[in-house]
Image (tube, rainbow, N blue to C red):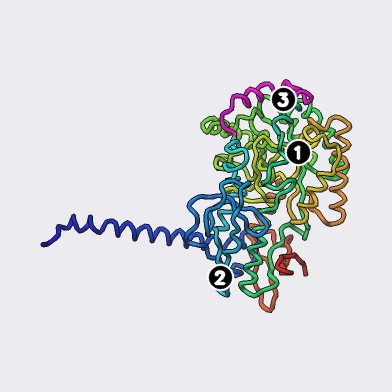
Amino acid sequence: MRVPKSEQQEAHAPQVLKSIEKVKEWSELQMHHSNANRVLTSHFRCPDDLAEFTVAADLSENAGYFRFGSVTCYGQCFGGPPAAFVTNILPRAGQHVRIDAQAVHLPFDPVRIVDNLRFERYTANSMRGTKSLPGKNPIRDAYYFVRPFMPVVVRKPFQKLYFRGWDKVPFPTWPVDQTVEGIYEQLLVFAMKSKNRNKVPFVWFWPDGARSCAIMTHDVETSAGADFCPRLMDLNDTFGIKASFQIVPEERYPVTPRFLESIRERGFEVNVHDLSHDGQLFSDRAEFLRRAERIRHYRKEFRAQGFRSAVLYRNVDWYDVLDFSYDMSIPNVAHLDPQRGGCCTVLPFFVGKILELPVTAIQDYSLFHVLGDYSISLWKQQIALIRAKHGLMSFIIHPDYIIPEKARRVYSDLLLYLSELRSQGETWIALPKEVASWWRLRSEMNLVDDGGGSWRIEGKGSERASIAYAVLVDDKVVYEFN
């Protein structure tokens, strides 16, 4: 008996769907492979043919925590389900890595794992659950309503109560988290082993061979802080360190063209600091879109390239609406910030078209008023850890909180220490806009093989770029210059 065409089609439908699903899975796998192969080039600006990475096809259904060498990762992995919480026993993905002459076979997608850290995707499974995103919260709203009228001495007890147990949070690692750098370096080790190479050239992270970078930023929150800006600029100039001033456009204090120009004409930078500093920027999508339109207006009026949100509240999924060259709102490790999390890196990175310059050092307010520490000991500890990974030292110093002589003296000690590092040729101290400009230029540079082991850098700005070498020593990467 002849089967009607419609019945034949119906009978074959499950097979067709299965074939479509297989093609889809294959396409996604190929995309993961392609992205994985670019992961080292995007970070190191090294030769494109350094390594071939493949990603296991049957990754876990759910994302979670697992170990990769000495670092903690978050995402999907091969070889069993990852842990739901970082405090659980974490499976070790490193045992499933295979290396041969053709490729490095990975039990996870390195691009997604790095993005999960940088974009704080892991925070939903943190010790404090979904508190990572600043949605509607009546208690918080009430606090920020009365906060402008509360002196520091009144706020401190509430803040210390809120932050209790901060030093027990296991991830990210306090006081500086270097997980992303650890992942990249381990991938580079695998790639070098696969190709049987012990030395790989790449474009150094900073211009003119600087071993690290530092930026100083000042968030102006109150009228007292705005009035103190000229004296703060005098203090910065004593040590030859320029900074950016993040100005709140509305409601906090008068912002006149003359005030903004008084900052710019002295060689400092002006950026936009939220809209009204009320802690509500990311609480509601519709309200965010309304405020973002106003913020874009002030970007033009201030001639600003950079942005920072109030209280370092953030939602990277909404960043595409902000029309800035760079942002400075994501902490490296946020144990002492109202929004927990952290990007787990000490180097700049892109969030879509916006470049993120992460906050990598403790804020002055947290140091003085939460920890009660009036010294630069913690800052020096963080600086040492950041320099070990040749990263960006990014500081937030509020004009509002260093008016007292005791606090100002500590800030002077920090400026002196940074200026000494610069004089030793260890650190490039620049304005945030200069760092952002350099990092964008570097992201477009390429290494060209001239033959015979000779390399050169192509791309705009390459005259300031340096070629460094990643050298394999005892299964670890060390950096060298010729």
Between 25 and 210, the residue placed more toward the observer is 25
Circle nearer the N terminus (2, 3):
2
Is residue 64 part of the magenta span, yes or no?
no
- Residue 294, how many percent across, how many down? 59, 31
Q: Residues within 10 Å of mark 1 (few under 14, many from 20)?
A: some
What residue lies at 48% left-to-right and 52% top-to-bottom? 61
Q: Using the image, tell me which numbered label, if any, was put on residue 363.
A: 1
What residue lies at 70% left-to-right and 71% top-to-bottom? 199
User: SS at mark 1?
Assistant: loop
Residue stretch in magenta: 134-155
The answer to whether residue 255 is visible is yes
Locate the N terminus and report the quarter of the image it occupies.
Answer: bottom left
User: SS at mark 3?
Assistant: loop
Please identify the dominant SS of the magenta region. helix
Type of the residue with mark 3: Tyr
Residue that numbered label 2 is attached to: 103
- Spatial distance from mark 1 to mark 3, Cα to Cα? 22 Å
